[in-house]
Image (tube, rainbow, N blue to C red):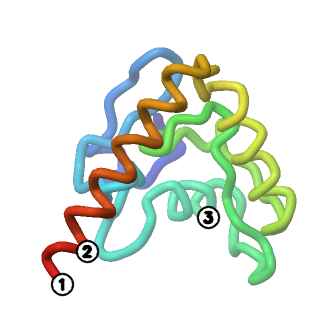
Amino acid sequence: MMILPPALRERVRPHGGCWVWTGTVTPAGYARFNGRYAHRLAWVAMNGPMPADQVVHHTCGTRACVRPDHLVLMGRGPHVAAHRARERETRPVLTLEQRRERNRQAQRIWRAQQRRR
């Protein structure tokens, strides 16, 4: 953790190979520090300025991780593709009955919303 500036280092704890942010976290799970994404700050501290057409990708899949060697630069297209691939790997496979029940729930919610209008 010596790579991180002291202000960031104070808000990190090691967990399972990652350096997990203990400060403010967005509802989506991303670390925030002084109104900026902490993983971007960590990447810049290690590598210098970020090109405008690149984004920082978590290779570990932990959104609150700020460990510089878990962060790589990617173009937006490959970044979206990587997220979609990871989502497919972790999404549970639903049975036909589970899909039907999900559809019934969605229909009940939709009908309730229509009645309130």
The residue positioned 47% from the left and 42% from the top of the image is 103
Residue type at tag 3:
Val
* Secondary element type, mark 1: loop
Residue type at tag 2:
Gln
* Quadrant in which the C terminus appears: bottom left
Which residue bears the numbered disc 1? 117
Label 3 crowd bin: few (<14), some (14–19), many (20+), radius 10 Å: some
Which residue bears the numbered disc 2? 114
Residue type at tag 1:
Arg
Left or right of residue 28: residue 7: left
Of tags 1 and 3, the one toward the viewer is: 1
Q: Which mark is residue 20?
A: none
Looking at the image, do the residues carrying marks 3 and 2 touch, with CB atoms under 8 Å apart? no
Looking at the image, do the residues carrying marks 1 and 2 touch, with CB atoms under 8 Å apart? yes
The image quadrant of residue 44 is bottom right
Mark 3 or mark 2, which has the lower sequence index?
3
